[in-house]
DNA sequence: CTGAGAACAACTCAATGTGAGAACAACCTA
DNA sequence: TAGGTTGTTCTCACATTGAGTTGTTCTCAG
């Protein structure tokens, strides 16, 4: 049997039916709090529960392209603004009973977005909203999405340590204080302003100066801050390590 | 097809056929060199090429269980020895054209194993072997497995930095020098023996002393080395960072 | 049996990085 | 204009790291 004969005789129906979906844990920062994009399910199973935006992967699209499409559909975004959103694969979830209908393997993705307008109503039949992560506990989440979100949040906390991706939560130009606010929000505790400033400027390629400053000082006083944009580093050397939690140390 | 249509009538046969496979990048150290478990494909496509061990996920098994099963089949291992192998999900690969037969999404896994006997011949129709990673360049690899392996190797290098998983390449009891050899092999460059020793013993929960020493000194002389076993830490604090490569610094 | 070489384990010391706080000027609001 | 806030830069003590040295125990060759 040569390769052509093999392909001709090959029947995809021979395989157990498995569906593959792409889901997105999309994070942003609004009003100093970490927010997560959720949709409300309009049909069973888990009707009325909150869920991650996602859907079946299309026949001719790559996994990450499918995630980007789902993200575009739910946020109503396109073009340049969509392209500025960081998107990476988070992991796959395929427990046999995670969906009561059939075997579904979900390839979860993680997105970091700057503050975006509320999802356009009617862009999709399901209503989407940015929910503060702190309000997650009171939500009923569909499937194993609580676990997926947990993994996504931990990945986000970890990524801020050794990549410059915190800048993806901000606009193209930002101040060191705004960058520090990203870290404090994602990590959930305050950082020393002076040490953070020193560290950010000392890591090669993390940020580069634009030469400009903000038009005004902070809303409660203080001098104008210098503006920076993201540098060309893809990894932070040395990394910006978060303080060790007590439980981690043995 | 979006999720609503799916919910209205979810006959599995309505979906574009997608197959899900689990593949394993299994690493071990033999004679001071990093080795990788490969099989030789006995059927098209890519007949005669080398490939990662793997196969279709079974209807009632979790993804990681499928990976463990494939690993057991190819290594001929079971029970306690199989359980000591570290296994984690690496990532999913789902480019539409990665398999000429049909849409196949591969969920790749990464395994760290101590030195194992050669795969039992005849345990599977495909012949499996441990190949030195340095010999990979001269191999024809099936599908996108070259990329998967590359990602697996980078993940392995990275995991040694902030987890105690290097111990999984060794037997239950080991010396600091053997542990250092793991790092040197995976990272591909020598480390300072004294500093490594100090660091390993100072990180809480990395290793714990057994109180015993080796029966003999090294094959070329030197005193008997103290024996250690893996500690209970799951993360290294502070981490054992590999020296920054020049290219990474801007 | 003995000497040469190897290597485990402990040490020193300089250089670098980090945590905590102080200083100071620029800026806001009242 | 006064008082409080904040961006930025310093200072200093302390911890960590890189590089090298020392002392001792062991294997192997002759």
Image (tube, coloured by chain):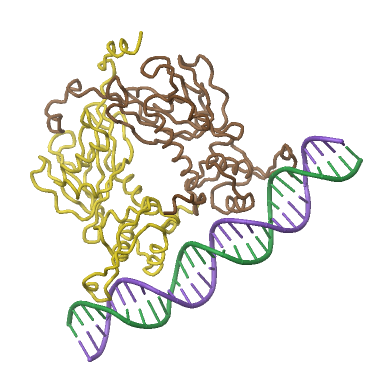
Chain colours: A yellow, B brown, C green, D purple
Task: Left or right? Give the position of A203 relative to B84.
Answer: left
The answer to which of B225 and B44 lies nearer the viewer is B44
Quarter placement of the C terminus of chain B: bottom left
Task: Left or right? Give the position of A232 relative to B103.
Answer: right
Q: Is residue A46 above or below residue D25?
A: above
Q: At 61% from the left edge and 53% from the top edge, which residue is drawn?
A: B195
The extreme top residue here reads A1
The answer to which of D25 and B209 lies nearer the viewer is D25
Q: Is residue C29 above or below residue A32?
A: below
The answer to which of B65 and C12 lies nearer the viewer is C12
Q: At 43% from the left edge and 29% from the top edge, which residue is drawn?
A: B24
How many marks the image carries: the answer is 0
Quarter placement of the N terminus of chain B: top left
Question: Residue B201: x, y in percent?
Answer: 59, 51
Asked whether residue B69 is in view, the answer is no
Q: Is residue A125 above or below residue D8?
A: above
The answer to which of B59 and A29 lies nearer the viewer is A29
Question: Residue B62: x, y in percent?
Answer: 35, 29
Q: Quadrant of residue B222?
A: top right
Question: Residue A20: x, y in percent?
Answer: 25, 30
Question: Residue A198: x, y in percent?
Answer: 41, 67
Q: At 21% from the left edge and 32% from the top edge, which residue is drawn?
A: A56
Q: At 15% from the left edge and 33% from the top edge, which residue is drawn?
A: B2
Asked whether residue B181 is in view, the answer is yes
Task: Left or right? Give the position of A50 relative to B61.
Answer: left
Q: Quadrant of residue A102?
A: top left
């Amino acid at each position: 049997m040569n390769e052509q004969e093999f392909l001709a005789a090959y029947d995809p129906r021979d395989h157990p039916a498995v569906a593959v979906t792409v889901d997105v844990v999309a994070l942003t920062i609004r009003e100093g709090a970490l927010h997560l994009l959720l949709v409300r399910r309009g049909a069973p199973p888990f009707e009325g529960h909150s869920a991650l935006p996602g859907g079946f992967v299309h026949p001719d699209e790559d996994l990450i392209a499918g995630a980007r499409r789902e993200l575009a559909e739910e946020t109503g975004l396109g073009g340049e603004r969509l392209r500025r959103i960081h998107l990476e694969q988070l992991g796959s979830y395929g427990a046999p009973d995670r969906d009561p209908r059939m075997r579904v393997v979900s390839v979860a993705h993680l997105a970091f977005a700057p503050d975006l307008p509320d999802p356009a109503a009617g862009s999709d039949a399901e209503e989407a909203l940015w929910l503060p992560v702190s309000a997650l506990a009171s939500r009923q989440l569909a499937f194993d999405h609580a676990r997926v979100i947990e993994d996504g949040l931990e990945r986000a906390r970890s990524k801020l340590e050794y990549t410059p991706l915190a800048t993806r939560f901000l606009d193209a130009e930002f101040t060191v204080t705004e960058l520090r606010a990203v870290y404090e929000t994602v990590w959930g505790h305050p950082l020393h302003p002076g040490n953070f400033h020193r560290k950010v400027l000392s890591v090669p390629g993390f940020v580069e100066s634009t030469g400009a400053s903000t038009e005004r000082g902070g809303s409660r006083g203080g001098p104008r801050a210098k503006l920076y944009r993201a540098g060309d580093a893809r990894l932070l050397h040395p990394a910006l390590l978060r303080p060790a939690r007590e439980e981690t140390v043995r």
